Image (tube, coloured by chain):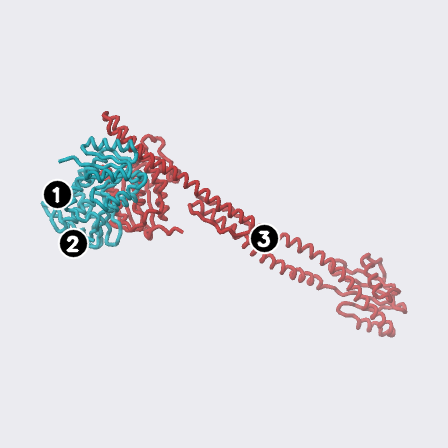
Chain colours: A red, B cyan
Amino acid sequence: MIHLVRPSLGLVGRILVILLLTVTVEFCTSTMLYERASQFSLREDEAHRLAEHLVISRKLVAERPLRERAMMASLLSTDRYDVRWSPTAPPSPPMAPQLREMRQQIVSWEPSLGDSSMTLRLKSPGLNSVVTGAMTLPDGSWLHFGTRDVGGDWDLALGRVVLALVPALALLVIGSLLIRSTLKPVRMLAQAAERYGYGDRVILPEIGTGEVLRVIRAFNAMQDRIQRLIADRTQALAAVGHDLRTPIARLRLRIDMIADGAARDAMRRDAIEMETMISSLLAFLGGGDSDQPVVRTDLSVLATTLVDDAADEGHRIRYEGAEHLEAHVRFYDVKRALDNLVTNALRHGKTVVVSVERRGDLAVLRVVDDGPGIPESRLEEARQPFVRLDTARGRNTEGLGLGLAIVERIVQAHGGRLLLSNRPSGGLQAEIELPIEGPPPVL
Amino acid sequence: MTSSTILLVEDDPSLRVLTARALQENGYVVRPAATGPEMWIAFNAEPVDLIILDIMLPGTNGIELCRQVRQKSDVPIIFISAKGSETDRVIGLEIGADDYLAKPFGTRELMARVRAVLRRGGMDRQSDVDRRNEARFDGWQVNFPRRELKSPTGAVVDLTGAEFDLLSSFLHNAQRVIARERLIELSRTRLGDSSDRSIDVLVSRLRRKLQNEGGDAPITTVRGVGYMFNSEVTRA
């Protein structure tokens, strides 16, 4: 069975993306709102400070005699404000509307500045909004001022953004952990569903949130139903198989009473074929069941016995390989599996070689024939139950097409593998790999 | 020789009639029974030489009946079962049945088994004292009822019926020379095996299975006479 895993974000990924999206949108909007509000208060702040500075500067400069005023003005220049004095008025272009608002804020904060015919100008607008301006002193001379680059604002904003991002990130991490744990039952379910196909019955603990719980309950119930369905069918089929044996037994005894030799022999062959079919069906249904004990077995001797029997029946078959190789297996199952391979090989080839050898932790039972082999494209199909590959000469083929399927079942129940391949020199090579230490324990 | 009496326990009426007829045609006296109680009536009425017992019976099953019979008598028993599984066969032989016949069977197969068991029963009664026991030699272990051989390492060593019979013949005549003719005769009594596989081939196969790292099999050829099993056999 091939599992195609499509690369996908997964449920956790998807939920995380949703979370990320919501958090980002929320963050952006709240930042914007916050920024708006703080910008407004910042500007008002700015206006108030400027107003205070201007009031003081104006007073201090006005109090000085004319020649000291320039010096006083430069003394009043700070990191933020630039103050100069000049006896004449500057050219005054029309004020930008934003500045008009600022002027109003300044004036409303320090009404004494109202009669100073203050003008404000925006210098190099855009990047650093530097506001410059001028106002008259009581004696008609002019005080020029300018705010110095109120930089740092951007850094401040960035810092705030980063700061605000930290809890968002923490939220994401916590969120993903919570989601993972919430989805844990779903992961378990997926694993269980995967394993179920291979014959394991996995009853899941009923944990998780409401929806997941329902799925788990449904899954457990479904497993039970499937199990029951299969068991019922198998039992029915097996019962029919067993029950058919009595009428066939009657048939065989009746056949033996027939006087006509040719007809009797033909009917006997038919009855025996029916019997063979039933036997293989029952072996398939019961194949690989674990009620047979695992015993230490000499596989080489087992193979030799089968080879000797076939040789006695006149087949060209020989054994090669180890004289003795012991492994822990279900004796009759393995014997049947090897017998099926040998029977297949003898049916399709003229010469058959059987061997048993050790390969690491594995015992390898190999049956090689010199027949036509199996087309590469149908090697997999050959293991399927009820598949007979040689439909072209189907009349010669007896049985139900369960031979290799039975082998496969038995071998799988041992935790081993059945390998089929065509030999370069022609013919089929069938290998059974069995763990020497025996089947893995059933969980 | 008077004809042997066979007690046939089979619940399927037609099969019972057919089997009885087949046996009668071959010269046996048949007493049919359909259930356990019927069997006991027939069994207690007159001595029988052989019981043919179906495992699947209504009421008391064949295995239980066999156990009960064994407590009273050594009469040979042949099991018949539609299950045909190896586990069944082993259980049957272990609780004291002499042979096992899987359903469906033909007349020839049935007669061969009946003849073999009757002949063996006649001979074994005197000689085969430990039909239900075990024997050991050189670390090897033989279980007679299960017809099973285990190597010194404890591994099951698969033997054909003929090979096992040959081995038992050797074990019962350990450290004595057995003539080839006698071996052939002995091996023929089992299973009515009609294959004319030569006794020498059989011996060489058994030898091959019995040899291991510890050395060769303890079977030596005595030129012109036969074979000898030269290892000490202990019985458990």
Tell which subunit mark 2 falls on: B
Q: Residue furthest left?
A: B224
* 10 Å crowding of disc 3: few (<14), some (14-19), many (20+): some
Q: Residue at x 24, y 35 (%)?
A: B32
Q: Nearer the viewer, residue A152 or A264?
A: A264
Amino acid type shown at disc 2: Glu
Query: Which numbered disc covers residue B182?
Result: 1
Q: Residue furthest top?
A: A260
Q: Nearer the viewer, residue A70 or A428?
A: A428
Q: Nearer the viewer, residue A154 or A428?
A: A428
Let me know if marks 3 and 2 both belong to one chain: no
Question: SS class of the residue under badge 3?
Answer: helix
Query: Which numbered disc covers residue B232?
Result: 2
Q: Position of residue A90 (x, y in %)?
A: 85, 63
Q: Residue at x 19, y 34 (%)?
A: B28
Tags 1 and 3 in contact by the CB under 8 Å rule? no
Q: CA distance from mark 3 to mark 2?
A: 79 Å
Tell which subunit mark 1 falls on: B
So how many labels did they put on this image?
A: 3
Q: Position of residue A435 (x, y in %)?
A: 34, 50
Amino acid type shown at disc 3: Leu
Let me know if marks 1 and 2 both belong to one chain: yes
Let me know if marks 1 and 3 both belong to one chain: no
Left or right? Give the position of B125 relative to A402. left
> Which residue is disc 3 drawn over?
A16
Q: CA distance from mark 1 to mark 3?
A: 88 Å
Q: CA distance from mark 1 to mark 2?
A: 21 Å
